[in-house]
Amino acid sequence: MDEVKLSQMDPRALKATSVQASDEDSSATPQALRITAASSNPAMFTLPWHKPLVQWPAELLANLPRGISRHVVRFVHVGDEVYAMKEITQSVAEREYELLRRLQKLELPTVSPVAVVTGRRSPAGEPLEAILVTRHLKFSLPYRALFARNLRPDTAERLIDALAVLMVRLHLMGFYWGDVSLSNVLFLRDADSFAAFLVDAETGDLHANLTNGQREYDIDLARTNIIGELMDLNSGNLLPAEVDEVEVGNRLAERYHSLWSALTDVDSFSPNEMWKIEQRVNKLNELGFDVDELEMKTDTDGNRVLVRPRVVDAGYASRKLLRLTGLDVQENQARRLLNDLDAYRASTWRQGEDLEIVATDWMREMFEPTARMIPQEYRSQIQPAQFFHEILTHRWYLAEKAGHDIPMAEAVESYIEKVLPQYKLDAQAMEDINSEADAGVVDDDATYYNPEDDPDAAVWSS
Amino acid sequence: MAEVVFEHVTRIYPGNDKPSVDDLNLEIKDGEFLVLVGPSGCGKSTTLRMLAGLEEVNKGRILIGGKDVTTMQPKDRDIAMVFQNYALYPHMTVADNMGFALKIAGTPKDEIRKRVEKAAEILDLAEYLDRKPKALSGGQRQRVAMGRAIVREPKVFLMDEPLSNLDAKLRVQTRTQIAALQRQLGVTTLYVTHDQTEALTMGDRIAVIKLGLLQQVGRPTELYDRPANVFVAGFIGSPSMNLNVHPVVNGQAKIGDDTISLPADAVNKLTAEDNGKIVLGFRPEDASLATPTDADAFSLKVVNVEDLGSDGYIYGHILTDDSSAEQSTMMSDQNKMTTVRVSPRELPGVGDTVKIHIDPAKMHLFAPSSELRLN
């Protein structure tokens, strides 16, 4: 579209976040390539859409670890960004795109949808499947990449805790997942924990409220899938020996239920125990949730007060840190940085001052100089807030060992030398992960129609 | 034995005043493959989800194998939802990929092996049991994924549009496989689809549902040959049935300037509410070209013809007052034109006017007021 036409368009249309022709039958396969996108990236038009994704040239691909999926998935450089591309049928792609957009509007932790590409054809005119494009979540890793490194033995448990939080948040907003598994999640480091993001919404559905049956089904399926995924790691000798797969799977159900009840149960107490409301709110804050609305009522004889949080928002600490410093980080990272900010205020004798002002100085004197010390080669692999958190931890260990305080600069140097290299996924591990991912793909057309490949399929289906 | 019974089952979503599923009575016999088919939003998926325990039932009850499961949790119902997004686990053997859920459930080892071997036999995977997925073709991997559901030996399989994430070629192949597999296993199955071709080709019986109301249940040929109402008549079959409202004059249907004989017992069932009209339907293959002098035939102005080699199709408008009603020339929407299947050797030219005779034994007659079948 040229400039003249753009200026003539309704300004509301220019600001639209989704563009789609509505007068076409959306179920029909378009004859020409069509890109439905939330925002335009001109580089999208230069990609080899006429080729099946498995045949895309290596120079376009970003070498990042992929999770297992039944579909063909690739990470592709598009301009300055990296997009995840998934080859699926048009109806499924369009549905998942819309669903991901709605989840984003609800501010839920999911990957963000970029586009649906339909009407793809090979040069010979053969129709190709649609592609769903999402933005690659920076610094994130699939669970298999986490297990490919030397990790703490409790990694599996920490991943499960993150997944339980994600499920509760999705369920609170009425999202039924239908296919919960570690494979359908990406993990971001979050201080000593992980934060989980939904990456696959194919089987999901948004409802006003979920039934217990829907929640229980999600939990039960999650448990089965997690145990299966861990058993698989175990078969590949990738799971620490002390991990009991079934126990880890059961942990998900326990963590989910305890968080769900903390967030939704009705408290009952007498009218002279109103301090219990504050106690409840504090407990929710500790769990990382803000209470936006409380529902309070008295029972029929007025002797008991019934209190239930009606609206809870995740990200209590991360919102506070964002307000103070402009840093947008995960919840536990935020908590750690807020603690350090408090310590900084105390050590500089500024308890009486506005926290906002102290925070500005803390950013300038503490956080930013440290973040600038991340070596270039690791800048795409570790978030500044995570780096800062790990330096603090490392510094504490060094001090404990030495018996006295260690200067920040020394701690950073030691951390970069001794700990940071563990972040690098070596080339061999990356190759293993991606070839494993390919081995699990079910929907790759290319492997279906060669009769020599699979003589039995033909016999069997006849 | 596990038959499934829906007894007066109703589901009203919160905030809706109309039920999404309204007083459903349906029985799926033990071992039967029942396809629930209808347009989007008709309540078919809601019905399946109520059976799965994912949706609450507001009224009525659901029984599996004689046991009331209406309020039971999904995992206690002994059902299997087939074809979620199964990917395969790369480090596990085919046997472990199929049997791991049984291991979690604490099934004894030899029992797992027995069931896995049985499933592998059926899926023609027996010789691959100790291989890893990497050594399998796409088709074999797909079957391993199916095997995962089979080894659980549930009372009921539930499949909600399982082919929707496959491309067109694979869909046809997998359709055949699922139907064959279900017959071999003999597990009671509820299959939900919007695609009437899937319904006709796969189901032992088909239940057609529209706006939450069950329209008709029967074997594919019953639905095709004797649709109970206008909706089923138009929904089942491709290309779809020709359906038009015509005035009834002296016991005959007036089609354009021509008249067609109607069976007297059907005409007698018309009431005052039908305003002297009748809905006449016939399938494209149940009509033929007639001679210009044939008394029991109507005139059709040919708008388009298709030669498919084995069959020929005539698309046209019914003639009135010697001029065809050409105001609706939407070529893509077959419903607006009359379609007749003939031998490709007999195809007329575009613009010709031909006489069409309807096989009186294959005529479908409905009352315009109730839309119910008359003959």
Image: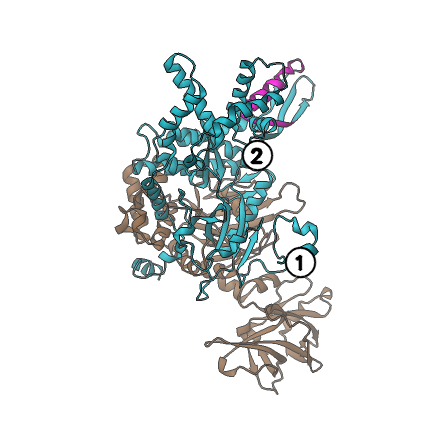
Chain colours: A cyan, B brown
Q: Is residue B140 above or below residue B280?
A: above
Q: Secondary structure at mark 2?
A: helix
Q: Residue A263, relative to residue A23: is it above or below?
A: above
Q: In this view of the protein, which residue sits in the foreground, A194 or B373?
A: A194
Percent across and percent down for residue B7 are: 55, 46
Q: Residue at x 61, y 28 (%)?
A: A323
B351 or A453: which is nearer to us?
Answer: A453
Task: Read off the magenta span.
Answer: A271-293
Q: Secondary structure at mark 1?
A: helix
Q: Is residue A280 magenta?
A: yes
Picture mark count: 2
Examine the rendered structure and indicate whether residue A137 appears above or below residue B314.
Answer: above
Q: Quadrant of the C terminus of chain A?
A: bottom left
- Residue B342 falls within the magenta-colored stretch: no
Residue receiving disc 2: A172
Left or right: A390 as drawn, with respect to B90:
right
Query: Whole-percent x and y of residue A83?
Result: 48, 47
The answer for how far apart the CA atoms under marks 1 and 2 are is 44 Å
Q: State whether discs 1 and 2 lie on one chain.
A: yes
Q: Residue at x 70, y 77 (%)?
A: B250
Amino acid, disc 1: Lys
Return the residue at label 1.
A5
Question: Residue visible at 61% across and 17% down?
Answer: A276
